[in-house]
Amino acid sequence: MSTYPYKNFEHAVVAVDVVIFTVIEGELKILLLKLQEPPFADKWAVPGGLVKIDESVDEAARRHVWEKAGVKDAYLEQLYTFGEPGRDPSGRVISVAYYALIPCSRLHPRTTSRYADIQLISCSRLPPLGYDHDQIIRTATERLKSKLGYTNIIYSLIPREFTFTELQTMYEIILGRKLDKRNFRRKIKLLGLIKSLGKRRVGESHRPAQVFTFKHRSPQVVEIL
Amino acid sequence: MSTYPYKNFEHAVVAVDVVIFTVIEGELKILLLKLQEPPFADKWAVPGGLVKIDESVDEAARRHVWEKAGVKDAYLEQLYTFGEPGRDPSGRVISVAYYALIPCSRLHPRTTSRYADIQLISCSRLPPLGYDHDQIIRTATERLKSKLGYTNIIYSLIPREFTFTELQTMYEIILGRKLDKRNFRRKIKLLGLIKSLGKRRVGESHRPAQVFTFKHRSPQVVEIL
DNA sequence: CCAAAAGTGTTCAGTATACACCCATGG
DNA sequence: CCATGGGTGTATACTGAACACTTTTGG
């Protein structure tokens, strides 16, 4: 890096912060770490950290998802870049925020010595947060809700095999409102995004439900709601 | 900054790049600068530069709009952050891209010693661009088109006073397709975003048109198209 | 009187919404 | 046989799209 031209420029440094969503126990939850050191000791924060000199910003975000949630191929999307001086009291840090979607079945939170307490916490009962992470989480939640309506990204949040009711319930949990069963099923069928696996979910003290899966697991723009 | 904690971290630095749009001569145009030094001599680029240590990223973008276009209160919106290593051959620069909207009547491009050639160039006839600015411009153009459809931001691109046809033409130029006059007028009237100024555009060898203005000049989400 | 753009309603098709009952299973 | 969720169709309101003629001015 001897030719590095910005050596004498007093810079900001770049970090990423990742809001990791999952749906579990009938709620939309976020993976949070308990901070142990000042200036935000005992506050909570989303996973994040500085971007290394030789990795892309996307890679940095993916690395943090892997380190804290144990998943390598989560759905990951850049949200917004937060760059107010003063958002991090310990220095000029500009943060590129991301959000990730992980089905609860695949998520394995990992504690580390630096973050002894990692928890999935419901979006509707957030604890006091450090930095500007409340703002980041609000932005992420809005984006997720909005994107559910015009893309198929829910495929990345639901287990590979699911029933129609499970799919509908997942929408209802995230959107925070009830949907009409018949209209929902007609719409989803018409879009042709999912296919029946020809088997049934048995042993549940009611009529067995067909099991479905998404035909494709890649983001598409489609009018869902 | 003696307590600055990241001194020994080999960082990326942060820049902004701003795609400045205007509509003039019946076309959507972008303000471009001709680069004069390697590695992109004779290529073109959008205005941009490093973020200063004591300014927010938004402020840096606004500063570049002022320096190159002579406008202080343009509509400005963050687009996306481009952070691949290698996007700038001269060092690890992460760029937060913005786009700005300015009515042609208010735009005053300014040359500098560093950028002797500044031009407004049609989106449909872009010259060879340096860095990843073609990608940034594509992203900006898509966002602008999409946002026209569900917000009122066109207020920031049209002169303060305008006729109904001028408003419609501006949509048509940006979207690249014709709209139906009667449907368009009904929709806009129904939304109640604009008001007649009670005067007419005279002297144009056809029936005089009413002159309108936007009631409010702040971004709102409304279903336009 | 001719050219040019302003201004104005109705019809139709497609989509979104509201709504209720029978079915299959486990206990 | 009872409780529980699975599964299905129709009628109505609303919204978006297509479409043509008269008016007013300047030259």
Image (cartoon, coloured by chain):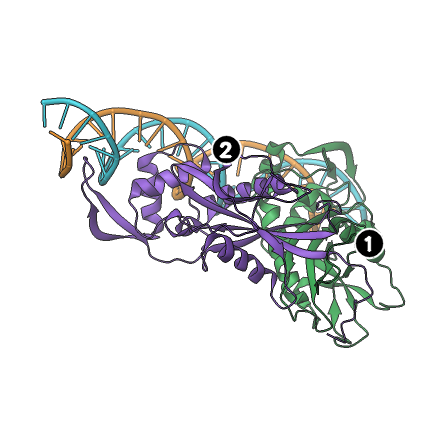
Chain colours: A green, B purple, C cyan, D orange
Number of numbered discs overlaid on the protein picture:
2
* Residue type of the residue flagged with mark 2: Ser
| Helix, strand or loop under label 1 | loop
Q: Chain of mark 1?
A: A
| Helix, strand or loop under label 2 | helix
Which of labels 2 and 1 is toward the front?
A: 1
Discs 2, 1: same chain: no
- Separation of marks 2 and 1 at Cα, in angstroms: 40 Å
Q: Is B213 situated left or right of B19 in this image?
A: left
Crowding around mark 2 (Cα neighbors within 10 Å: few <14, some 14 to 19, many 20+) is few
Name the residue that disc number 1 marks.
A2
> Residue B179 location, x and y as percent?
38, 34
* Residue type of the residue flagged with mark 1: Ser
Query: Which quadrant would the N terminus of chain B be assigned to in this image?
Result: bottom right
> Residue A155 location, x and y as percent?
71, 42
Crowding around mark 1 (Cα neighbors within 10 Å: few <14, some 14 to 19, many 20+) is few
Front residue of D23/A27: it is D23
> Residue B100 location, x and y as percent?
50, 51
Q: Chain of mark 2?
A: B
Question: Would residue B73 be visible to someone looking at this image?
Answer: yes
Label 2–label 1 contact, CB within 8 A: no
Residue B61 placement: quadrant? bottom right
Q: Which residue is depicted at the point 62% across and 54% down?
A: B49
Name the residue that disc number 2 marks.
B124
Question: Would residue A108 be visible to someone looking at this image?
Answer: no
Front residue of B44/B42: it is B42
